[in-house]
Image (cartoon, coloured by chain):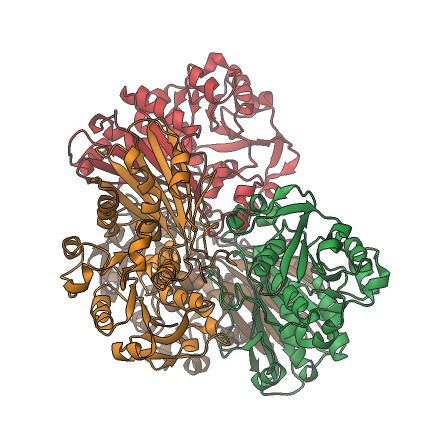
Chain colours: A brown, B green, C red, D orange
């Protein structure tokens, strides 16, 4: 089955290419970025002698001719206009941007006016552990943000046991690849190396995404106080969710029950780390309590489970394949 | 004035040496470790052509002959028996171990039976912002732990405004030097590089130290839920304190008021980072609120403000010097 | 076809497991280390939910019952006695240690007395670009050292053009995984982070390995002056070969000619880096001249091309498979 | 004595500020960059509560009013026009750029047309071990490049023993701060972290600087084949000089003799590393031979000995102070 990758220049675009090269069913028939006219090996020198394809300037009609499904690794706002075209041409879309992740009102409050009000209401939030059936029948998947993926997988199983009137705090730490490939002060080696700091505390766009999904999935209204940090590593994400229990529980049992059928969530007996999930689609989770105080600790690869490999899992489910087909479970990471 | 450094082999011992070499009043007259019989340049090659002193095998009577004050950078338990001897010989002590930091009962619950019950009751907790007057008259300073230093400086100004019935969470991140110079799995480069993880969540010995000091300094009983992490950096410490306010406040104003006379606490307008305090005795603090949710964010150098430079500040105060005499405020850090 | 991995605890053992899990033809039927009695998931937590196999205490007869080929990732000296047993039981061996890499005399000079003089003379040096035909017919492959792999692939094409009376210098830089998983001062995070240094200059055991292979493959006697360094990264190896040309040449052309049929050597137009080969079996090479001065610059993943993936390439060739079957060409590296 | 710092925004400007804040004789009376109109604490947040000075827009006449000596940490070309003005106004200059380092002809070949032909001929190359007397009487010091400093201190003592007809190779490795504070692909964290590569092999501007100084200081003409690398660390520089001896020598003795009176060169018994010199003005050197093959290994802090602290040493000597007055010899580095 032929698939297209639109937005091949950035980190998530490259990860999509890597996964799809080795995918047993999907075949990359089209790769595009904003300029085109370049071999993919010039764009990504690590692909020399691995993949020999011309990168096109993105064009929806061309995509529709050669692919049944497209992965969009585009910036917010750019994505929705391209997705709209593709959907009207009958191409299935897995969108890695934020454009279809939120309810219209939430989106417009935190991002910008929406330009595809028709399709946003039909999009499915691509967190397979909670939306697998909806994904099967969908033509448009909104791939979750990296922080929401790690935070929701940790938090959702406990919502029923948590005192949602008490504050919920999330202290999240991300490798720098989450900040993208573009040159920025914050990701200059001289600034990040041997350093660590939070950014946008209580004011990050992934905060309303987490709050909304908790409400939609669990029917619970709660205040999520989210503080992201940048770690001096390239990839990986570690999340601490802190909450207050209504009463003491056997927290590990709750977790095991929640994910007993999941292919990609692993319950750990010890605090999780970046290394065990780096290069894979796994989300590792550990939980600890101190009386009614609750600490849920999750780890994902921000570029894979937090973006590209989760996107391919969603595509697998949309296309009736096994969800783990071609999905990385081990990696040659440092 | 002559001073001794006992326990010169570890990280904090070396930092003490570096500070005291350049100190205008204190003169290093004695350096010891557990083996002795070695030049300090062999122990620490960075001191070649800088300091040329024999390292002795630690002996309290020898110390008393040549120094009026001793810094003990010894392991817990070893420290108290050596401190006891020194105090009986009339030598002032700044102890960097945990042996005199806690009330007797708390100590014995979390560490081991105490062997110097006489002096533990007279020791002063060396957090200068809160105990300066007591330090002036003391002969025995218990230098605070690194995590408690960063956590208490962040938390204490807000205790009166916090709902202490609600859970207080601390997500703390430390450079690996806090784990010491000895070879351990956790600080093997292959394990820590490109990694990050928590350890002893809700179960670290610095948790009761923080709880006790909040009670003693502010008269408040509260549950501190403390989760430390290891960062893939050598030095530095970043602390997130999360708490619930009784009502909304102007948090920055509270902070500025609390530290308006402090030489070594800097209030920041943006989230703090490791780099700004690395190599110095500063504690940088930033605060943010989200309604009643409170985030206090502090940064220190775990080996300096969290150990050796704070020890020298305490010695300065004990000896009637300016508290910032010879204390590093800038550093040639990466 | 069933294969065994002996020595599963170290870095190269884990990499062998990862490659073979995904290998289309080889099937892991036996995994052993020196203690046994443990699930492979306890030994390597990243394998949870990926591979569920008991690790045995290594026993040659047990191997012979369940596998036709064994990979030995054992320490020098331990390896030869185990290999001997296996070979006598009819099991093919790919040995990742140094035990069969050298001629007997060279080995005994630089390592220790040899305990398997029978098989050492029949072993084939597993550098596929130069020994492919011999590998096909061999029952015992001596997998090359990491430094010799990167150095020889760079140097060999130029030997005919080099003035071998002039000194040849190699400045090699390796990620710390080459120093192994065991706890050592040199790989303590506090020592290696933000650091870099050479070790064993002109005195490393890979120096005679390079000299011997240059002589055997190219019939040239020359003095190789080898200086290895440790880099503050986990994986990767970068080699600078410096030599003096007899006369000026088109060096890139020589390189392209030498490797025109190679699946795993890529000639680069710019200086090579660690990232482009990390996680793969590729060796990237760049060359530059300054009159008669020659700089050849190669990069490999020290654990893969320098050990485990090259071992599987050798096994592929021994077993009549395509040499790149199941061999990693792209990676989810930072 | 009042001094000015022109070019305060970059890495070397900040290091100058740090050194001069603690200098016992020099007093910073003027700090400038290209924009001015900012407190130095906004430019460098680490200086909060340490130095409270307005940064001016650089103006030579203003400098002449308030300072007798100026340190120029400006880009090449910008520096010479500003230096010219200052010299004409009677202000002594220590120039950290390349503008006065080379003979006119060499400069114009490798940089650009020179705009201050009057003063370039009177400038002194500020390598104190070889030009101390000339520095004493000079009004214009050309502070050496970082690579030439480390390379020349290693190479010069051996020139008389080296076969200068044979090729000399230098494999140099620098922390990224040498590439400056500006945003560049090469110093994006995602590109440099876990990476290492050479750049401009045999084609770096420091190559003619080294060749010229060898000729001027030792009267020897030789081809220096220089290959610089970028290391994934912030500061530090490690140099390997490879050469061929005319005959075997006691190399360590040569080194000890050469630097027996030097305050800032330390001869080491083991290969040097970045950590021992980071944060200081020391140059550590180690030497090893293999018959006639020679390996000289030096380490400096690229921002200090390679720029700012060497500049202050030069200013000390120019002003009749002890050369080590106020110069860092120990550091709170990781």
Determine whether, in the image, residue C41 is placed left or right of residue D4.
right
Residue found 36% across the figure and 36% down from its top: D295
Q: Position of residue D34 (x, y in %)?
A: 29, 75
Front residue of C47 and D50: D50
Please state if D104 lies on the left or on the right of C325 as rendered. Answer: left
Q: Position of residue B291 (x, y in %)?
A: 58, 84
Q: Is residue A242 above or below residue C34?
A: below
Question: At which x and y percent is residue A47?
Answer: 30, 48
Q: Kindly indicate the quadrant of the structure image that contains residue B159.
A: bottom right
Name the residue nearer the viewer: C332 or B129. Answer: B129
Q: Does C154 appear above or below D312?
A: above
Q: Residue at x 64, y 33 (%)?
A: C36
* Residue drawn at the location 54% of the way across and 37% of the way down: C10
Q: B134 above or below A240?
A: below
Asked whether residue B94 is in view, the answer is: yes
Q: Give the left or right position of residue C247, taking residue A256 as reference.
A: left
Q: How many marks?
A: 0
Residue B76 seen by the camera:
no
Image-based side of A19 in relation to A168, left or right: left
Residue positioned most to the top: C118
In the image, residue D303 lies at what x, y percent?
38, 58
Q: Nearer the viewer, residue D139 or C1?
A: D139
């Amino acid at each position: 089955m032929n698939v297209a990758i639109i937005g091949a220049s950035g980190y998530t675009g490259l990860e999509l290419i890597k996964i799809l090269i080795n995918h047993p069913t999907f075949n990359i028939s089209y790769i595009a970025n904003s300029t085109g006219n370049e071999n993919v090996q010039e764009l990504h020198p690590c692909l020399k002698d691995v993949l020999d394809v011309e990168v096109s300037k993105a064009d929806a009609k061309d995509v529709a001719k050669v692919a049944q499904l497209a992965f969009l690794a585009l910036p917010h706002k750019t994505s929705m206009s391209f997705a709209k075209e593709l959907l009207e041409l009958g191409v299935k879309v897995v969108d890695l941007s934020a454009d279809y992740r939120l309810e219209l009102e939430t989106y417009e409050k935190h991002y910008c006016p929406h330009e595809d009000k028709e399709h946003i209401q039909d999009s499915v939030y691509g967190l397979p552990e909670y939306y697998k059936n909806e994904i099967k029948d969908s033509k448009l998947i909104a791939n979750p943000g990296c922080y929401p993926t790690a935070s929701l997988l940790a938090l959702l199983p406990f919502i029923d046991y948590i005192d949602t009137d008490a504050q919920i705090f999330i202290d999240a730490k991300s490798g720098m690849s989450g900040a993208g490939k573009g040159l920025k002060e914050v990701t200059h080696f001289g600034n990040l190396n041997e350093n660590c700091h939070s950014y946008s505390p209580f004011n990050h766009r992934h905060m309303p995404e987490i709050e909304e999904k908790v409400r939609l999935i669990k029917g619970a209204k709660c205040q999520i106080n989210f503080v992201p940090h940048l770690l001096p590593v390239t990839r990986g994400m570690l999340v601490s969710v802190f909450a207050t229990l209504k009463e003491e529980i056997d927290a590990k049992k709750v977790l095991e029950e929640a994910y007993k059928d999941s292919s990609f969530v692993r319950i750990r007996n010890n605090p999780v780390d970046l290394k065990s999930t780096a290069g894979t689609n796994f989300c590792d989770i550990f939980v600890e309590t101190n009386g009614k105080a609750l600490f849920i600790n999750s780890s994902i690869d921000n570029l894979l489970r937090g973006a590209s490999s989760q996107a391919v899992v969603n595509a697998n489910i949309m296309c009736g394949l096994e969800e783990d087909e071609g999905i990385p479970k081990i990696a040659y990471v440092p």
